[in-house]
Image (spheres, helix red, strand yellow):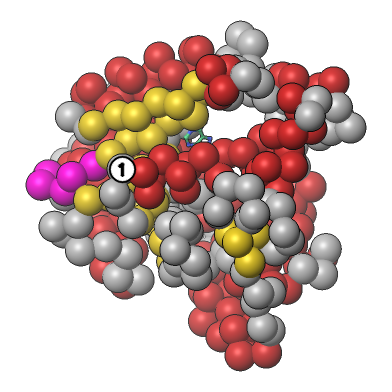
Amino acid sequence: MPVLCSRCRGAPAEVRVAAGRLRLCPDCFIEYFEERLMKTVQEFKMFRPGERLAVAVSGGKDSGALLHALRRVYPNLELLALHINLGIKGYSDHCEEKVRRLADMDGAELRVLRIGEMGFTVDDFLKTIYRNRVCSPCGVIKRHLLDSMTLESGVKTLATGHNLDDVLSTMLETFFAGDLAQLIRLKPVLPSRHPKQTKKIKPLIRLSEFEDYMYALYTEIPIRSENCPHSPAIKKGREVLEALGKGRPGFRYQALSLFLKKLIPILEREITQPELKTCGRCGFPSSEDICAYCKRVDLVKGN
Ligand code: AMP
Ligand code: ZN
């Protein structure tokens, strides 16, 4: 006898979710996922229903699930999907094609920026001092361009597909690096601190990587089948998270609650965020006279 879905009691259960207390059939899982996203949006007052919202879509399961679920939960929301083609050989064009199909399926306006047309690619960083760690300049470039594309479109809020596992593993890495000011940036809503900075939201913060994967699978959205050739097979924070959570299904949810309710308020009281200046070159926020983006672009173009 198959185990029946804990919700509808009619169909066989296929997925175990939320600390192992529920076993759901595909239809009830889709419903569960969308409800959880909606509650997160409401709990943290991420956006108002009539607002225009930019969504950073990479071609992967997380941001794909995000765009699709937002469309289904808020059918009248004006969604602007943003994609950056990073010019990574054998990977970026494949991602762009999936994003185009998804935006089409969800009736979202789409803007694609191909950095190759700006005169460089992420692969070009292999020839620089970043040869073993191109993910570092890639992150800087993506953050800057997503902000600028959002603002150029007249939109103020940018949603990204960061999930529960992303936030917790980055939290561990950042904590052990001793970067407490950076920890605050993992909050589900980050208000803008500069005229050229968008408000950032993470509507998937209460959903795990596995749940994003299952949602993408059950809703049959187009997502990439290739992995980025530059990304490490496993990140350190992930390994630690896996080890801590082994045999404790509720661990990650408790860890997130502790982080949001206990640690963040203390950090916000005690730590002053570094002052934001304005980059003398591009006018975007920066901690120094010239921002990290402008420096990386200079480096890769050999200026
Ligand atoms: P990552 O830093 O690659 O883990 O990605 C985190 C989030 O950034 C994703 O969930 C997306 O929302 C966004 N993102 C990453 N890569 C891209 C891209 N090439 N174009 C647009 N958004 C992206
Ligand atoms: Zn700059």
- Residue at horizontal 57 percent and vertical 39 percent from the top: 142
- Residue at horizontal 30 percent and vertical 18 percent from the top: 101
Name the image quarter holding the N terminus. top left
Task: Tell me where residue 183 appears, x and y as whole percent.
Answer: 66, 68
Considering every residue shown, the one lying at the far left of the view is 76
Disc 1 crowd, CA 10 A, few/some/many (<14, 14-19, 20+)? few
Can you tell which quarter of the image residue 36 is in? bottom left
Is the CB of the residue bearing disc 1 within 8 angstroms of ligand 1? Answer: no
| Magenta highlight: main SS | loop
Q: Nearer the viewer, residue 120 or 303?
A: 303
- Residue at horizontal 23 percent and vertical 22 percent from the top: 104
Task: Tell me where residue 190 appears, x and y as whole percent.
Answer: 47, 66
- Where 266 falls versus 139 (above or below)? below
Name the image quarter holding the C terminus. top right
Q: Is residue 12 visible?
A: no
Task: Tell me where residue 200 appears, x and y as whole percent.
Answer: 44, 58
Judge left or right: residue 118 versus residue 275.
left
User: Is 76 a magenta residue?
Assistant: yes
- Where 14 falls versus 286 (above or below)? above
Question: What segment carries the magenta color?
Answer: 75-79
Q: Secondary structure at mark 1?
A: loop
Q: Nearer the viewer, residue 211 or 81?
A: 81
Judge left or right: residue 111 versus residue 130.
left
Residue holding disc 1: 153
- Residue at horizontal 71 percent and vertical 53 percent from the top: 290
Q: Amino acid at mark 1?
A: Ser
Judge left or right: residue 16 versus residue 121.
left
Can you tell which quarter of the image residue 140 is in? top right
